[in-house]
Image (spheres, coloured by chain):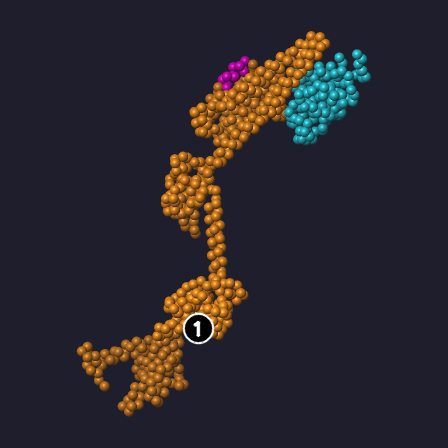
Amino acid sequence: MSLPVARSGWDQNERSRLFDEMPSGVMVVDDDLSVVDSNRAFGRIFGPAGGRACYEVIKGRDSVCSKCPALATFEDGQPRVIEETGSDRSGRAVHFLAHITPVNGEQGRPDYVASIVTDLSPTRRLRHEYQTLFETVPCFVAVINRDHRVVRANEAFRRVFGEPTGERCYRLYKRRREQCPDCPVDLTFEEGSTQTSRQMGVSQDGRPTPYLVVTAPLRQDDGEITHVIEMALDMTEHQALEEQLSHADVLRLALVESSLDAILVFDSAEKVVLANQSAKELFDLQEDELFGSLAPNRIIPRELRDVLKGNQSSLELPETLIGSADGNEVPVRMAAVTLEVQGEFIGSAVIAQDLRELKQMAREKLEAERLAAVGQTVAGLAHGIKNIITGLEGGMYVTSTGLKRGDQDRIGQGWGMLVRNMTRISELTKNLLAFSRGETPRFVIASPADVAHEVVDLFHDGAESQGVELIAEIDDSVAEAMIDPEGLHSCLANLVSNAVDACLVCGREKCTITVRLYEDDETIVFEVVDSGCGMDYEVMQKAFTSFFTTKTKGGTGLGLLLTRKIVQQHGGYIDLDSEPEEGTTFRLRFERARLPGREIKEESNDG
Amino acid sequence: MISCAVERRPLVAIVDDEEDILIFLCLALEDHGFDAVVTSKSDSAFNLLVQTEPDIICLDLLMPRHTGVGLYREISRHPKLKKCPVLIMSGLAVRGDLPGMLKSAGDLPEPAGFLEKPIDIEELVTALGDLVGRTVEVGA
C-alpha cells in the first residue's frame, strides 16, 4: 500500500526515520529468531542486536525461551502482549511490556515478527518505592473503603492490629462499635480532598493515645473515589514533649514575671522583646516604649550599650543611676549579659535591682545605731546620777550624825560632801544640755585635714609647756567629705585632751602624742596615739559605757560619750587599742559610703 | 549605855572608785560597830587587801568585765583572801543579772552577798552582820 503523498514531502526516508526514532523500542525477528532490524530506542535498552538471536539480546540466554511468544505468533499469526523481565545491555534486570505483532508476507503468513517494547523499569521501580514507603513508614497506613473497612494496611499497622480482615477502622483504632461523629474518612469521601485532624484512639494496652490523622482520597481511573488512604501517627511522645515545653515555658514566664528584679530582654538589634512587670515599674515604661522599640536612653547606662550590641559578653554595675520618666534619678544595681545560641549573638538580657529600698534600710540602720547609742548613754547616765545621790545621802548622814554628836569635824566633812555633789549635779546638767543641744550637727563639704590641723594647732603649745610633745601626721591629700567640722573638732579635741591627761597622770619623763589622718579603702581615719601608761582591759571596757573618769578631780567623763555620739552621727566607728605601760590609740573611722548624703545638705539648707 | 563588845570589831574593807562613797560608808560602818579600811580600785588595792586581812570585803562592781571584776577574780584565787566573804555592790546590775555576769566573766564564784546601789545603810549593816555571824550593836 502506498501512502498518499503529502505536501510536506512524507516519503520512504521519513518512514525509515520514524521507525528509527520511535520512543518505543522495536525489534524485528525472522523465523529463526534472529534480529533482522531494531531501532534506536531498542538499542538503548538492549544494545546492538543485529544478527543476534532475540533470546540472547533480550534475555542473555543461549537458547530459546520456553513459551516463546514470537514463535507462537509465527505459528498462529496472532498478536500478543506480554510482560517480561529481561536483561539490558549492561546485564541489569529490565522489566518490559512487549507487543508482539506478525508481519505477514504474500502468503498471508508471517514472514517476520515485530516486537514493540516498552521499558516498565522506571514505573516498576517507582511502584517498588511506593510499596516500600507504604510498608515501612513509621506511622499506621491503611486503605479504607466506603464501608469503613480496612482492606489493606502497612507493616506497622499489621504489627499492631494484625492482618486487615476487613475490620472497621473505628473498631481498630478506637474500639468503637459505631462510626465516629467527626469521621475524617467520611469527610475525605465527601470533600474529595486530603484532610488532617487530631484523633484520640486507644492503644493496644488500653491507653488513650493521641493520633495525628491524614486522610487522602484514592481515585479510580474514572475519577470516582472508592477508597481513602489513612495515615495515623502516634503523638503520645510528641504531646508529652509539648506539655513539657509548655510547662517549662509557663515556669519561665512565671519566674520572669514574678521576679522582683526588673528583667528586660533585647534582640540583636537592641529592640525590646520582653519586659517583666518589675521592669515596667522600675523603668517607668510606657506601652509604646516596649516590644519592638529601642530602649530609651534614660534607662540604659552608657557602659551597658556594648553588651546590648554584642561587643561585650557581660557587665555589672554595682551602683548606677537611671532616669525615671519624670526626670528623677533612681539608684539601681544593673547587670547585662549577651545571649548566644551556638555561638551566634541573638540578643541580650538586662537585670536591674532598685536600690532605693536598700538605701532606705541603710539609713534606718544608721538611725537604729543612733538610738542604741542613746540608750547606752541613758544607762550610763543613770549610773552617774546614782553615784551623786549616794554622795548626797552620804553627805546628809555624815552631817546629821555630826550635828547629833556635836562633832565639828564631822559636820564639816559632811557639808563638804553635800557641796561637792551639788556641784556635780549642776555640772552634769550643763553637760547634758550641751550634749542634747548637740543633736543637730551641721554637715557641710569640708576637709578632714583642716580639722586635724586646727586641733593640733590648738593643743600644741599648751602640751609642750607641760612636757608633752604633740606630733602631726596628717595626709593633706585626703579628699573633702560631707562632715560636721565643729563636731569632729570636738571629738579630736576631747581625745587629745584625754591623751595629754594620760601623759601627765603617767608621770613618764617623755611622752608623745601623735595626731594622725589618712584614708584607707574609701574610709577616712583619725588616730590619736599617746605613749602614756595605757589602760588595762577593764578600764577600756568601762571607758565608753558610762560617765567614767580616772581623773580624781573634776571631769564628768562626758567627753567620750559626746565623742562617741558625734562619731555615730557620721556613721563612723570608734576603736580603742591599749596596752598597759605602752600607751593608747583611739581611732575614728568614717566610711565615705556611710557619711550623710545630699539629702542632709538640702535639709540643713532649709533649716 | 552598855555596849557589848564581845570581841574585836569586825574589819570591813571597802573598795570603790567614788571618794564620797568611801567616806560615807567608812563613817557609817564605824558608827555601826565595824572597823573600816577604804581603797579605790587601783593597782594597790589588792596588796592592801592581802596585808590587812579583813573579815569582809565590800567590792564595787560596775558591770561584767569592768573594773572590779579583775580584783574579784584575784581575791577568789588567793589562798587566804578567798575565804573572806565578799559583798558585791553594783551600780548597774540587778540581782537577776548576777549569775549571768559571773558566768560571762569566766565562771567566777558567787559572792557572799549582793547589794544594789544606791546603798541603804541599814541593809548593808544587816548584811554584814549576817556575814560575820552576829548582831553588832550600834554605838551611840
**x 30%, y 82%: residue:** A37
Q: Is residue A76 placed above or below A410 in the rendered structure?
A: below
Magenta residues span A455-465
Q: Main secondary structure of the magenta part?
A: helix
**Who is closer to the viewer here, A406 or A191?**
A191
Residue B112 image offset from top left, x and y in percent:
73, 25
**Farthest right residue in view:** B6
The picture quadrant where one finds residue B91 is top right
Q: Which residue is identified by label 1?
A: A147
Colour seen for chain A: orange
Residue A418 image offset from top left, x and y in percent:
64, 13
Chain bearing mark 1: A
**Who is closer to the viewer here, A204 or B53?**
A204
Residue A293 image offset from top left, x and y in percent:
37, 45
Colour seen for chain B: cyan
Question: Which quadrant does the C terminus of chain A fall into?
Answer: top left
Residue A522 image offset from top left, x and y in percent:
48, 31
Magenta highlight on residue A464: yes
**Farthest left residue in view:** A7
Decide if residue A508 is in sight here. no
At label 1, counting other C-alpha atoms closer than 10 Å, the crowd grade (few under 14, some 14-19, many 20 or more) is few
